[in-house]
Image: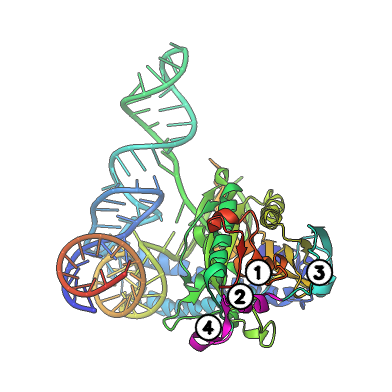
Amino acid sequence: MHDIKYIRDHPDAFDAALKRCGEPPVAGKIIQLDKKLREEIVALEANQASSNTISQSIASTMSQGGDASDLKAKGSSLKKKTQTGQDQVRDSRKALNDFLLEIRNLPHDSVPDGEEEADNPVLREVGEKPSFDFEAKEHFDLGEALGLMDFETAARMSGARFTILKGGLARLERALGQFMINLALEAGYEEVSTPSLVLGKALYGTGQLPKFADDLFQTEDGLWMIPTSEVTLSNLHRETILAEEDLPIRYAALTPCYRAEAGSAGKDTRGMIRQHQFAKVELVTIATPENSLKELERKTKAAEEVLKLLKLPYRVVELCTGDLGFSARKTYDIEVWLPGQGRYREISSCSDCGDFQARRMNMRCRKKDQKQTRFPHTLNGSALAVGRCLVAVIENCQQADGSIAVPSALSPYMGGLKKIGKA
RNA sequence: GGAGGGAUGCCGGAGUGGUUGAACGGGGCGGUCUCGAAAACCGUUGUACGCUUUGCGUACCGAGGGUUCGAAUCCCUCUCCCUCCGCCA
């Protein structure tokens, strides 16, 4: 959500920032809606003020035993005006609010200009790509050949975009999740276990709603399945005032994530890259405005650490203005190398959302002994997506015989197992 | 699922139609007293929005509607919490 006062005072800067993201100008429309609303509020409140005065006159007249029927008639006629005024204000407020809710966050000044994914600058490449003296296979060929990855059976009970893992691969997935959440704790994040189903307002808060309802699953009684625990972790302090001295607050959760993938028909149809359900360790930070960019670097480092310890090659790119997500003001994507595909694939996305989500959630902070509240900044990042990391381990650690070498960092989580072979 | 009880300011807790934005107590803050502190005493202490912004106005007592000139107080709907019974991982 945007600060209406900022838009009133800097309409041109607002539109210019949106333009960098390829969005049309809206400040004029917003100011017009806002002006209408405020005019109606002034009229309404003047009305309410005189109603209140009349009511008080009635009270004092009656307490002195006088006749107040004239005053009552006056109050009665004012009442109708007040009611229509209230309706107008409500409608205008909703119109402004609905409009504002659909406008994306503004990019930070430091974000590079660009139109699409191809324009994202690569910040660094880390680790060495493995070289094989055989042709590298994709994870689904390896997994199916091992008899430990089964898409057909999953499709029979759940439809497309689900996977069944067995034996060593099921254990490997669990090991990855445990490994990652433990790293998050070491990095200073507090572990949280949250619901997987949430009310719509939580998703409005983080920005998935109202624009992206198609990407989400909704239950029959109106609850939504979380597409990421960014939603639950960020909403932990919605509608509250935090003590600034307690910031930054850093949370981590290992949860399943559910995505409808409505706009992705035909994309990544084979394998585990794009599933309706996957596990992910998410890191969320609530920081003061002064510290949020610093926290973004810190969070990205924490995510990179997972890949370093697993010895998986990756690169970090910064999203250009045209590729930035709805709620983000600045984002780093981490892409892991997949030898089977012969390309980098996104495995983490770390974003600084500024005060955009805090405003939508009405989460505020305040310095000790100060009256004035302000909006903290929220950040989120995956560290990492477990499903895609499993894919990366399988493809990077594949052996000539089709077995998978377990990364040494993971071995303790797998009872010392060094290799996943045929079942 | 059945039967009851509840939701008021930072906390506890009054308040069943008229200067109640809300008694009283606690806490916090400021002050008096003190070498200092405690105690005592005095004062003060919500949020949001709007305006012709040293001030004024409006709204808010779980949420949304209704009755009324006027609602924290009456009526309706919903949400959440608690107790008992049933069911259950």
Amino acid type, residue under disc 3 in the picture: Asp
Q: In the visual, does A270 lie left or right of A223? A: right
Same subunit: marks 4 and 3: yes
Same subunit: marks 2 and 1: yes
Which numbered disc flags the more N-terminal residue, 4 or 2?
2
The disc placed on residue A146 is 2
- Which element type, helix, strand or loop, lies under badge 2? helix
Q: CA distance from mark 4 to mark 2?
A: 17 Å
Span shown in magenta: A138-160
Q: Residue furthest front?
A: A401
Nearer to us in this view, A62 or A341? A341
Nearer to us in this view, A241 or A393? A393
Front: mark 1 or 4: 1
Residue at mark 1: A403
Q: Is residue A251 above or below residue A199?
A: above
Q: Hey, which quadrant is residue A32 in on the image?
A: bottom right
Name the subunit of mark 1. Answer: A
Residue A43 rendering spot, x and y as whole percentages: 55, 72
Which numbered disc flags the more N-terminal residue, 2 or 1?
2
Q: In the visual, does A347 lie left or right of B44? A: right
Q: CA distance from mark 4 to mark 3?
A: 33 Å
